[in-house]
Image (cartoon, rainbow, N blue to C red):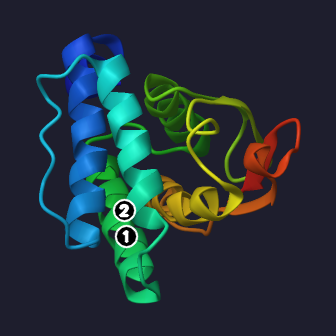
């Protein structure tokens, strides 16, 4: 893994940058004013991000949801360009690190079945908001993996013991 990726997944400052990138993705996609989180501790900024997305994704239009997915796909493709190794195992490992950074613990292997046993967003999201927020996940993960569409067969927010998805 290159130095930039290591910095993001191994430092508090890197985690704050990752959360800020996600906030920028949401605000630009939904035509909302920017929210600056870089100086807020990452645990607190993650809660702010979760509450913000729960509030604003509830009322976004289909056009805004499409834009959210398209912008997330663009972000995933941009991150992919930084990778030295682009095989499924290496990229899946990076995805798991990036998601662990924001309170989501995954296991398995993309594009096959991946299980999410813990997600910090569950306490903030209804099933409908989770579905809308998953458009970001689908875009970023598809971009990083080089294609595909993320599909869920179970969700924590719907009462399942875990999320199950595949690309």
Apparent side of residue 2 relative to residue 135 in the rendered image (left or right): left
Q: How many marks?
A: 2
**Residues at discs 2 and 1 in contact (Cβ within 8 Å):** yes
Horizontal and vertical percent position of residue 95? 50, 37
Apparent side of residue 57 relative to residue 87 in the rendered image (left or right): left
Q: Which residue is mark 1?
A: 68
Horizontal and vertical percent position of residue 146? 47, 61
Residue drawn at 14 percent across, 29 percent down? 38
Image quadrant where residue 163 sits = top right
* Element on which disc 2 rests: helix
* Element on which disc 1 rests: helix
Q: Work out whether residue 8 or residue 34 is closer to the camera in this orientation and state it.
A: 34
Vertical placement of 93 versus 126: above or below? above
Horizontal and vertical percent position of residue 79? 30, 48
Image quadrant where residue 32 sits = bottom left
Q: Work out whether residue 148 or residue 161 is closer to the camera in this orientation and state it.
A: 161
Q: If the image is split into quadrants, where does the C terminus sit?
A: bottom right
Measure the C-alpha gap from mark 2 to mark 1.
Answer: 6 Å
Q: Work out whether residue 63 or residue 4 is closer to the camera in this orientation and state it.
A: 63
Q: Categorize mark 2 by other alpha carbons within 10 Å: few (<14), some (14-19), many (20+).
A: many
Q: Categorize mark 1 by other alpha carbons within 10 Å: few (<14), some (14-19), many (20+).
A: many
Tell me the mark number nearer the camera, choosing from 2 and 1.
1
- Residue 153 visible in the shown view: yes
Vertical placement of 154 versus 44: above or below? below
- Residue 112 visible in the shown view: no
Q: Which residue is mark 2?
A: 72
Residue drawn at 39 percent across, 65 percent down? 73
Residue drawn at 35 percent across, 24 percent down? 1
Vertical placement of 73 versus 42: above or below? below
Apparent side of residue 98 relative to residue 3 in the rendered image (left or right): right
């Amino acid at each position: 893994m290159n130095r930039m990726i290591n910095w993001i997944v191994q430092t508090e400052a890197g985690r704050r940058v990752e959360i800020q990138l996600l906030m920028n993705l949401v605000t630009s996609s939904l035509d909302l004013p920017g929210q600056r989180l870089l100086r807020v501790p990452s645990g607190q900024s993650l809660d702010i991000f979760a509450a913000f997305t729960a509030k604003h994704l509830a009322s976004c239009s289909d056009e805004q949801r499409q834009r959210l997915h398209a912008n997330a796909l663009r972000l995933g493709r941009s991150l992919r360009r930084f990778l030295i190794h682009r095989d499924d195992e290496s990229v899946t490992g990076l995805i798991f690190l990036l998601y662990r950074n924001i309170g989501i613990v995954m296991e398995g292997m993309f594009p096959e079945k991946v299980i999410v046993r813990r997600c910090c967003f569950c306490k903030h999201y209804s099933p409908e908001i989770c579905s809308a927020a998953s458009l970001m996940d689908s875009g970023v993960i598809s971009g990083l993996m080089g294609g595909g569409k993320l599909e869920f067969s179970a969700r924590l927010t719907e009462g399942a013991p875990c999320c199950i998805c595949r690309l």
